[in-house]
Image: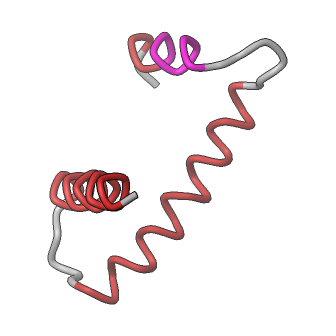
Amino acid sequence: MEQELLDELDSTLSYGDSRSGWVRDAIKLKLEVLEEIEELDTEMTDEERREFVVEAVREAVDEE
């Protein structure tokens, strides 16, 4: 993993948080999201999937 990415991750952790726990949760989240997205369109690239998820989250936040 790139050091820049690790540094960014470390900056989001609070006292007592573990990097491995964060990564584990991120993997679980991605697997769940991929399962849902695959039902929509299996031809998306990784970048297209990221953009789709970010836009969906923004729309959900705007609705609240």
Image position of 37 (left or right of 51): right
Residue 35, image x, y percentages = 45, 78
Q: Which residues are magenta?
A: 6-12
Image position of 19 (left or right of 63): right
Q: Nearer the viewer, residue 27 or 16?
A: 16
Residue 23, image x, y percentages = 62, 38
In this view, the residue farthest toward the front is 64
Majority secondary structure of magenta residues: helix
Q: Image height check: is 42 above or below 29?
A: below
Image position of 52 (left or right of 13): left
Image position of 35 (left or right of 51): right
Q: Image height check: is 28 above or below 35?
A: above
Whether 38 is among the magenta residues is: no
Q: Nearer the viewer, residue 57 or 42?
A: 57
Quarter of the rendering containing residue 52: bottom left
In this view, the residue farthest toward the bottom is 39
Residue shown at 28% from the left, 62% from the top: 56
Quarter of the rendering containing residue 10: top right
Screen quadrant of the C terminus: bottom left
In this view, the residue farthest toward the right is 16
Residue shown at 26% from the left, 86% from the top: 40
Residue shown at 23% from the left, 81% from the top: 42
For the image, the number of numbered tags is 0
Residue 22, image x, y percentages = 66, 36
Q: Image height check: is 13 above or below 48?
A: above
Quarter of the rendering containing residue 18: top right
In the rendered view, how is the structure colored? secondary structure
Residue shown at 61% from the left, 59% from the top: 28
Q: Image height check: is 25 above or below 60?
A: above
